[in-house]
Image (spheres, rainbow, N blue to C red):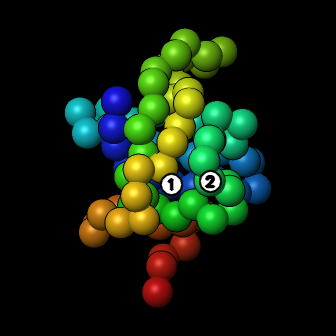
């Protein structure tokens, strides 16, 4: 599947992906491959697969696709980007 990083919760070491299908799924820092978690930002395109976790669906094997950002995505860590 493909989507964009929607929110990053750095202090919790997790984030939220909004899939191209509109579904939002969480991911854990440990599922990120090919990038440093601290370098992620909202709007980055990613590929991933869905798996069942403790609390329902979650993203696994999250891989950044490019350095392009998608306009109009959510804030990082709950703060507005400048």
Q: Is residue 44 left or right of residue 30?
A: left
Q: Is residue 10 left or right of residue 71?
A: right
The residue furthest left is 21
Q: Is residue 37 above or below residue 30?
A: below
Q: Residue at x 48, y 49 (%)?
A: 64
Foreground of the two, 45 or 54: 45
Helix, strand or loop for disc 1: strand
Q: Is residue 14 above or below residue 57?
A: below
Residue 1: quadrant of the picture: top left
Q: Is residue 56 above or below residue 39?
A: above
Say if residue 6 shows up in the picture: no
Q: Residue at x 52, y 16 (%)?
A: 51
In the rendered image, residue 53, in percent from the top left (x then y), is placed at 61, 16
Q: Which mark is residue 35?
A: 2
Q: Nearer the viewer, mark 2 or mark 1?
A: 2
Residue 19: quadrant of the picture: top left
Q: Give neighbour class at mark 1: few <14, some 14-19, many 20+ (Cα, 10 Å).
A: many
In the rendered image, residue 11, in percent from the top left (x then y), is placed at 76, 56
Q: Residue at x 52, y 64 (%)?
A: 41
> Label 1: which residue?
7
In the rendered image, residue 18, in percent from the top left (x then y), is placed at 37, 43
């Amino acid at each position: 599947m493909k989507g964009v990083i929607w929110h990053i919760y750095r202090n919790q070491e997790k984030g939220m992906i909004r899939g191209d299908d509109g579904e939002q799924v969480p991911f854990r820092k440990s599922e990120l491959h090919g990038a440093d978690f601290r370098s992620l930002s909202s709007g980055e395109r990613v590929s991933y697969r869905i798996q069942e976790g403790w609390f329902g669906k979650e993203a696994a094997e999250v891989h950044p696709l490019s350095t392009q950002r998608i306009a109009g995505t959510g804030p990082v860590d709950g703060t507005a980007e400048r």
